[in-house]
Amino acid sequence: MMLKIVLFYNVGLAAFSHLKITSLQFEREYSQPPIVNGNHFDHYQSYTIGKEEKQVSEFRIKKRTLATWRNIPIPKLSSEIKPHSIWHAMKMGTVSILDRTNIDFYGLEISIKAPIDKHVQIVSVMKPLLDGIISAFHHHDSSNLDEVVGRLNASINLPQEQIAHFLLDNSISILGERNLIQPYGNRVKWNPEDDAFQFFTITKEAQHPNDKWTIDGEIFTI
């Protein structure tokens, strides 16, 4: 389970609803937690409200850029967005693969370009946005393929053969093969290797004068 669940969803989205967040940054560090009021802890988490300008990682150095994408159209971001909508958009868009180095830990930067008059609560869309993007850089290991394709077909306006091709295609699969998607109840559950992403930023920009939503992004080694 990625720490975003612990740090944001388990705390409750209402804890962030009063903040007009235009940029969110997460990073994980493996070191001894600080001693707080004389107490020792196995884990430590800290929240900080930073300045609006782009923040720099406290622990991480960006090394090699592995993949980039620009102006990929996505559906309107709201609390109703699902990972498959973002995964589909990434598969339909143009992604540049610059390096296929396989390592333990990655970083991710995402820029949401939204209509000028639209507000999006980044915390409420963070999980499906990240799950959809990271899933696009895997290819599925064929487990339950017919079943998951049939279920996706109910939500994605594509022929089943095209959905299967996107799931199995390894052309941008810098994160490798994985049991990426599984039947879950009467739906599907995405299973990207999100714990490998130790650093990410999500920034919202108001740039489009119409109803267009797009995303830019970059995956890099750290």
Image (cartoon, rainbow, N blue to C red):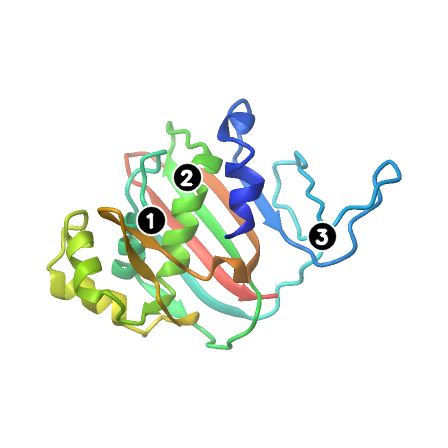
Residue 96 appears in the picture as rendered = yes
Viewer-side label of 3, 1: 1
The CA distance from mark 3 to mark 1 is 29 Å
Q: Which image quarter is the C terminus in?
A: bottom right
Using residue 58 as the reference point, say whether residue 54 is left or right of it.
left
Q: Amino acid at mark 2?
A: Val
Residue 107 appears in the picture as rendered = no
Viewer-side label of 3, 2: 2
Residue placed at 46% from the left, 47% from the top?
A: 111
State if disc 2 and disc 3 touch (CB < 8 Å): no
In the figure, 177 relative to 196: above or below?
A: below
The CA distance from mark 1 to mark 2 is 10 Å
The residue indicated by pointer 2 is 125
Q: Answer few, some or many: residues within 10 Å of disc 2's Cα (few below 14, many 20 plus, some between 14 and 19).
A: some
The residue indicated by pointer 3 is 58
In the figure, 50 relative to 62: above or below?
A: above
Using residue 9 as the reference point, say whether residue 189 is left or right of it.
left
Figure quadrant of residue 177 = bottom left
Q: Residue furthest top?
A: 18
User: Residue 125, percent across and down?
Assistant: 41, 39
Q: Answer few, some or many: residues within 10 Å of disc 3's Cα (few below 14, many 20 plus, some between 14 and 19).
A: few
Residue placed at 27% from the left, 72% from the top?
A: 169
Mark carried by residue 83: 1
Q: Answer few, some or many: residues within 10 Å of disc 1's Cα (few below 14, many 20 plus, some between 14 and 19).
A: many
